[in-house]
Image (tube, grey):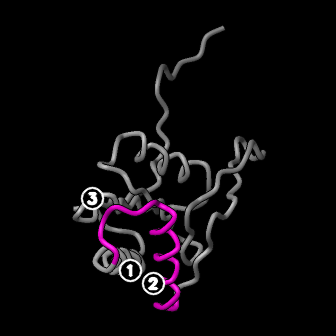
Amino acid sequence: MVDLLYPELTHEILAACFEVSNELGAGFLESVYHKALIIALQQKHLQVQSELPLEVLFRGQSVGYFYADLLVEDKVIVEIKAVAELMPQHIAQVLNYLNGTGVEVGLLVNFGTPKIEYRNLRKPHKRMTGRSDVTG
């Protein structure tokens, strides 16, 4: 079993997600769940930043920005979806956010189904691939 990073915080965030899902149900636009989740998280006294521009670095230099749906306690990116099902590209989106920033944990949450769907994602460790010997 993989140890979760920030287990108490991710539990609180997911509890808020379930509250939103239970009270609103499925069928609304992503923006509705976004606003409702901000309210639920703030009522849990969590620091929430919405549509925060996060800088992406390449070799220590800025190469652009992305806008995280939510950043909670400066530790967890929350990406909100309201789709029929989560797709690999949704997971890749969050993993890219984690790779491009110093944030280690991402929660991908889908409110578009009758039962909430989520993924707790960790920043991937970079691996070197290819040949280790370099010849000229």
* Residue positioned 30% across, 49% down in the render: 84
- Distance CA(mark 2)–CA(mark 1): 6 Å
Q: Amino acid at mark 3?
A: Thr
On the image, the x and y values in percent for residue 75 come to 54, 71
- Distance CA(mark 2)–CA(mark 3): 19 Å
On the image, the x and y values in percent for residue 125 come to 46, 48
Reading the image, the residue beneath label 1 is 16
Between circles 2 and 3, the one closer to the viewer is 3
* Residue positioned 40% across, 47% down in the render: 91
Reading the image, the residue beneath label 3 is 113
Q: Looking at the image, which is closer to me, 74 or 129?
A: 74
Cβ atoms under marks 2 and 1 closer than 8 Å? yes
Q: Amino acid at mark 1?
A: Ala
* Residue positioned 36% across, 40% down in the render: 88
Query: Secondary structure under badge 1?
Result: helix
Q: Which residues are magenta?
A: 24-45
Question: In the displayed structure, would residue 106 be above or below residue 95?
Answer: below
Tell me the quarter of the picture where residue 118 sits.
bottom left
Reading the image, the residue beneath label 2 is 40
On the image, the x and y values in percent for residue 10 come to 39, 74
The reply to whether the magenta stretch includes residue 38 is: yes
- Distance CA(mark 3)–CA(mark 1): 16 Å
Query: Secondary structure under badge 2?
Result: helix
Question: In the displayed structure, would residue 41 be above or below residue 129?
Answer: below
On the image, the x and y values in percent for residue 77 come to 52, 64
Question: In the displayed structure, would residue 133 be above or below residue 91?
Answer: above
